[in-house]
Amino acid sequence: MLGVVALIAIGSLAVTVTDVHFPGRALLAVAFAATVPGIPIVATFRIPSREVQFVLGVALSLALGLLTSFVELETGAWSPIAAQVMLTALGLTASMLALIGRVHE
Amino acid sequence: VTAHNVATAAGSWTTRTQQAVGVEHRTGSGPITIARRRSAWLVLGEWIIVVLGLAGGMALWWISLKQFHLDDSGPLGIVKAMPASYVGAILVLAITFGVQMARRRPNHLALGMIVACLVVVLFSVPNLVDGTAQMPVAYVHAGFVQYIGEHHAILRGYDARFDWPAFFAAGSVLTSIAGLPDARPLLEGAPLFFELLALPPVLLLARSIIGRGRTAWLAVVLYYSGCWFGQDYFAPQAMGHLLYLSSIAVMFWTVSGAWEGVPQPRPYNFWELLTRRPTPPPGLTDGSAFAIQLALTTIIGAMVVTHQLTPVGFIIQLGVLSVFGVTRYRALWLVAALFFLAWFSYGAKDFWLGHLGGLVGSVGQVNSSVSKGLTSRVASGNPTYLHMQLVRTMWSGMFFAVAAVGSLVLLRRRTPLAFAATLAGLSPFVLIGLQSYGGEIFLRTFLYAMPFLAILSAAALSPLLRLPISLRGMAVTAIVVFATFGLVVTRSVNVAFERVTADSVNAAQFVVGGTQSTKIAVVESFAPVGYAGIDTHKVGELGKNCEPTLVQCALRMVPDFIFLSTEQEQYGRLRMQLPDGWLMRDGEQQLIRSAGYRVVYERPHAIVLKSTRATAKAAAKMYPVQPKPGVKVWKKPKAKVWKKPKPKVWKTTTHAKVQARATAKPRTTK
């Protein structure tokens, strides 16, 4: 799951930076909004239920996306790409931490 | 780690399979091998049934999308517009679900796939049929998103919804990431996105309350069947509701440890309720519980800046759960309340300064909420349509009644979280005493209560799941068929005017596509104008109760464009019993003949009229400028007309007058 989310994060950022248009781009963006960075972050919590990890991860992804956009809007620092870079960095860092935690287990 | 996981998974799969077919372990390798082969074939056969059911159901649904005649929808919703293939799709999926539920041990993956397909079938109409998005207000939200994308700020004083801007800002970021010119493509898939993402939290909540058996799956189906409210379009409340569902599901999971056999305090001992600390589920450490609390706090923060009402409902639920000791996070309601008050007093200042009287004045006005939310909705209109509104109300009432039975069943069984679920289901109804919310408070209250009403209803029906296998499958299929068709009927009552046709979208694009500032009028507020240029174009209704006097209203307002559509005509027919063609035929002709408008765009479902010089003349004639009382109006002075002076006539002075002048006293000055 973490690998898939990492792929979505990197893929979506790459598509935004290169501005490549293809039919599934909107779906990729929606997948990014629903999974990054919440699912990797929640993976570091060591919750003993995958269901809960998924539910909390999706909600946290959406919440962080909302809050990032909101802060950019309120502070006048509007930049969609900066928001995406920030969320991707957060997601990839959390993925690394979660993987390190699993290896240590 | 991977090898261990694979081995564990394989072991558990074998165990599950054997348990499913009732295989007993025997000594010796021969019988076990045969039993394994048999069980493997059985599992394969069951999966073939699932795949065939899903493929058949989805194929019928795909065919039905081409066969829908949504123009035939009316007071009965889409009942007359629905093709047989759509009915067939639902039946096939319901039977497949019933077959799976009849198994000794439910196949959760298969059930999840069936329910997901059922959600796609139920919530894809009318969006995928029309190729647009239901609910014209969603297009207004797309307009907000576009404004933020263009100006990187909100439009102050334009609309109260801008005071909770997180959803629109996130929509703008998403539009940019997706490389879309505007947010309209996101609107079409929004109901499926929100409804599919609601599946895991509702299932988690059900499993936390009534266990991991098949009753939880029945609860999920009942949840969707009760959601006729249409609150899943591209809107802040849909996002707020998803965050609410996820948060409440995780919170209930954190106290679901009672399922492991740990004794719980008695629910009727108030002191125990106040002082108890719920048992966490096995394996949840204090560190993990604290991390979950941080995540929930973040989610609540996002909820507070996204939607105005969802946090209020959630705070009430959190407060009630805290008081009765059925949450690990007893201070969370306080944190949520502080977040809410902070944003409401700072960020939403424009809103509450303008509506303080209405906000405070409606507290405790239950009668007003009932009147606006229920009575006024069935006061006038097409008789069949009014009956359907009653059916909707009764549908929700039925869930409430069955849930009450379910609550009693669970409390009698001493199910640990039965009391908490009942409280959580009842607490949103407090909102009715606080606000009428523009007549929508009943919808929102049932929306927040629905997960619990569905779970408790499933508990009430759970004795049916203990019937013999063949009867159980039939009983479940019958329940699912009844529930899903109930949803189709109740959800689609307003579809005739809440749908948005492709013609309307194209007409809206024609009107608001230009950069020049224009004044656009609609007769009813069911048109997708407003998706762009909200600061450039002024969009509004012709006026209140203008249906019988379109020409007078048009000449009073004199808009540049008048937007007519079949959706608006259907609204008049269903809500005001106006005759067929009152707008698209008679209204158009009146506006052309008597108000001087001309047709600039015409399709079967949408007409755009543009004002001409004749419109201005007719308006000036009908409504000459009248001075307002107390205002001095400058008037053009009258031109002086030269008049021929009268010839002086010499008058003779009499001798007596000459004598009188001579004897008069001389004038003195002071």
Image (cartoon, coloured by chain):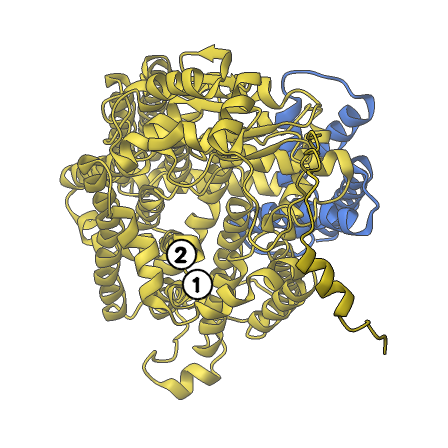
Chain colours: A blue, B yellow
Image coordinates for residue B79, horizontal then vertical, percent: 24, 27
Q: Given the image, on which type of amino acid does mark 2 rest?
A: Ile
What is the chain letter for disc 1? B
Q: Residue at x 57, y 45 (%)?
A: B627
Q: Nearer the viewer, residue B241 or B145?
A: B145
Q: Given the image, on which type of amino acid does mark 1 rest?
A: Gln
Looking at the image, the residue that sits furthest to the bottom is B271
Identify whether B26 is placed above or below A4: below
Image coordinates for residue B345, horizontal then vertical, percent: 66, 66
Q: Nearer the viewer, residue B637 or B127?
A: B637
What is the chain letter for disc 2? B
Identify whether B607 is placed above or below B456: above
- Give the labeled residue for mark 1: B435
Image coordinates for residue B136, horizontal then vertical, percent: 48, 32
Left or right of B595? Residue B268 is left
Q: Quadrant of the N terminus of chain B?
A: top right
Q: Are marks 1 and 2 on the same chain?
A: yes
Q: Residue at x 70, y 36 (%)?
A: B147
Q: Residue at x 62, y 34 (%)?
A: B143
Q: Quadrant of the C terminus of chain B?
A: bottom right
**CA separation in Å, label 1 and label 2:** 7 Å
- Give the labeled residue for mark 2: B441
Q: How many marks?
A: 2
The secondary element bearing badge 2 is classed as: helix
Question: Can you see residue A7?
Answer: yes
Q: How busy is the neighbourhood of tag 2: few (under 14 within 10 Å), some, or many (20 plus)? A: many
Q: Which mark is residue B31?
A: none
Identify whether B275 is placed above or below B201: below
Q: Are marks 1 and 2 in contact (CB under 8 Å)?
A: yes
Question: Can you see residue B211?
Answer: no
Q: How busy is the neighbourhood of tag 1: few (under 14 within 10 Å), some, or many (20 plus)? A: many
